[in-house]
Structure formats: structure tokens, C-alpha cells
Image (cartoon, rainbow, N blue to C red):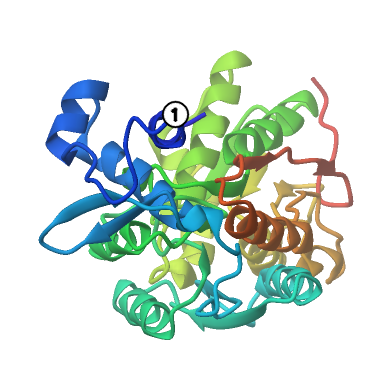
Amino acid sequence: MAKYQDIADEIKQKILHEEYEVNTTIPSEFKLQEIYAVSRHTIRQAIAVLVNEGYLRKEKGSGTYVDDSYKKEKTPLNRTKTIGVITTYLSDYIFPSIIRGIENELRESGYSLLLASTNNDHELEKECLKKMIAYGVDGLIVEPTKSNQYNPNLALYVALREKGIPMVMINAAYEELNASYICLDDVKVGFMAAEYLIKKGHQRLLFITKIDDLQGKYRMKGFISACEQYNVRFLTKDIITFTTETRETIAEKTVQRLKEEQALDGIICYNDQIASLLLDKLTENGYHIPDDLSIVGTDDSSLSHLGNKKLTTLTHPKEKLGQDAARWIVTTIEKGQVQPNILYEPVLVERETVKENEK
């Protein structure tokens, strides 16, 4: 359990045993920092949990008071029964499946959905967050925007938590916030893809990853770990990176690297979008897949089934992730207790883009 949740539970027990009496202030944030030997941020997280559960209330310029609203009806009249959902994209790639899972689960639970997208842009993310605050959503499901870069909107997320609005992040989580998350194990994705190719006799691997999102960083970590474990050498040039803005350059960079180093025999792609793009580009350039090169994608998206060659890939939970995120946020709201994080195990899906080399 997270440290802030432990602190929240301890303060809650003091309230229930009337060590902190209703309508009196609890110790200051500074004093609580001293008592629990943690950062101010951790104390604020604990307080936000208790405000959300109705054990505390914050009064501007006065302090934080013990409250007894937790004894009252769990569904207050001012609750909107609306969950805010912020994703990087809406209609592209795997996002419709995720959103469908969220929407179906929320509908079954009697909640509606307020949807917004950032287009993986921090300024648009800021506008989305302001929209959610203005509407008064009961909870938030957020896919981080450029999660491997500094985010100028962190203060807005902290403000939301201080208002007692529960939040869960999907696909990645801002490391600075220590936020709850529901994600694929991306380190394992990178490791499994590399391990699979190595066990198929591939010894020179090219790894293509996105570096403005944490998924790409973690998948690269898994790739490197597998190469080290199996004593497979790779060069700096054998890792090709891109960002949201430079995605269109990947195909040309890959072809160029393959021409420079003809011993490369396997390619691991950040996702099925990149793998599908490369399949077409490499075929145009005279490569035969998988005879000349093996390719592995990630996400088991609809793209993996298209084209002349069905793509070997790793699974992403997609609609199930959406359902679990909706269930997580509703349960957290209605029980007043933050639910555990969820980390999905990837599964390899073997199709037609990998061949077994002689070892």
C-alpha cells in the first residue's frame, strides 16, 4: 500500500476514536510531515483521500477540520455521476476499444462519461483539465500526455487531488505524482519481444521506440535487459527513437540503418502502427518478410491482421483496460477507498512475420 494511504488510514482511526474531534483542526501539514517523516506532497495526498471520504474538510485560510459527512448518505445531491475521461487520441488505433470499455462499464454503473482528448499536446491537456474542473466531474480517468517529458500541468493534477477528486491513469502514469495506474507491463513487453527473437536464432536486433512516452522508455529497458541476459550485442545505432512529431521519419531511418548494417535480422517495433508502416516500406524496398527480416509489433491491434503478412505481436488489454478503469474509479468513489493498481501481463501472439533462423 502507498505511504499516503497508510497515513490516511492512521488519521482516520484517530478520527473514529475521537482523538481528533469533529469540527477541530488536525495538526498542520508541517507538523504531520514531522510526525510521519514524509514529504509535504505525501501529506497532501493523504489529506485529499480523507477529504474525498468525508472525514476531513478544508477551509480556505483556516485549516483542515475533522468532518462527519462520512456518516451521511454516500451519494450526495451535488454529485454529477459523471466521470471525466482524458485520452491522447479518440478515434485512432486502439483508443476506440479502450473508450468503448470505459463507456459500457460506466453506463452499467449508472454513470455518464465526459470525454476529451489532448492529441498528445500539453496545452490541449491543460484545456481538458480545466474543462473537467469546471464541470465538476466525480472522478477522472487520464491517459498521460508525453509522459516521459516534463509536464507543465502537474499543478493542476495536484489541485484536483486536493479537491478530493479520485483519479486513475491508464497506459502510463506521471512518475512525479505517484498516481494510481492501470497499465500493461511495458518492461516485460520489450523483454519478451527480444527474448522471442533471440530464441528464434536472431542475433542482431533493431529496436524502434517512442521516447516522449513512458511506454517506449520501459519497453527499451526490457529490450536492453533481454540482450544482456542472452549476451546479444547491440550498437547505439541499433536503437532508433522517435517522438509524436517525428513519427513519419521512422521508415526512412530504418531503411537507412538496414543498408548500413546488413547483419541486422530482427526488428522490434514500439507498436503495431510502426510495424505495419515498416512492413509496407520494407516490401517497397525489396525486403521479404520474414525471409530477410523478422518483425514484432505490440498491442495486437486490428492492424496486426491486415496486409499480406499477419503481424507477430504482443497483446494489449484494450477494452478490458477500459472496463477495469471504469470499475476502479466507480468503486473508489462509492467505497471511499483507493483501489489497487493493475498491471497486465503481455502475451505473445505468433503469426507470420518471424522466421526461425539457424542457431
* Residue 316 appears in view: yes
Q: Please, is residue 342 above or below residue 336 in the view?
A: above
Q: Is residue 31 left or right of residue 80?
A: left
Q: Is residue 90 left or right of residue 136?
A: right
Q: Give the percent coordinates (x, y) of residue 13.
A: 45, 30
Q: Give the percent coordinates (x, y) of residue 70.
A: 51, 54
Q: Which residue is mark 1?
A: 6
Residue at 24% across, 40% down: 26
Report how many numbered discs are placed on residues in the image.
1
Residue at 54% across, 23% down: 225
Q: Please, is residue 335 above or below residue 303 in the view?
A: above
Residue at 33% across, 46% down: 47
Q: Give the percent coordinates (x, y) of residue 213.
A: 44, 55
Q: Residues within 10 Å of mark 1 (few under 14, many from 20)?
A: few
* Residue 37 appears in view: no
In-front residue for pair 79/354: 79
In-front residue for pair 50/185: 50
Q: Please, is residue 343 above or below residue 127 in the view?
A: above
Q: Give the percent coordinates (x, y) of residue 24.
A: 24, 46
In-front residue for pair 61/141: 61
Q: Amino acid at mark 1?
A: Asp
Location of the C terminus by quadrant is top right
Under circle 1, the secondary element is helix
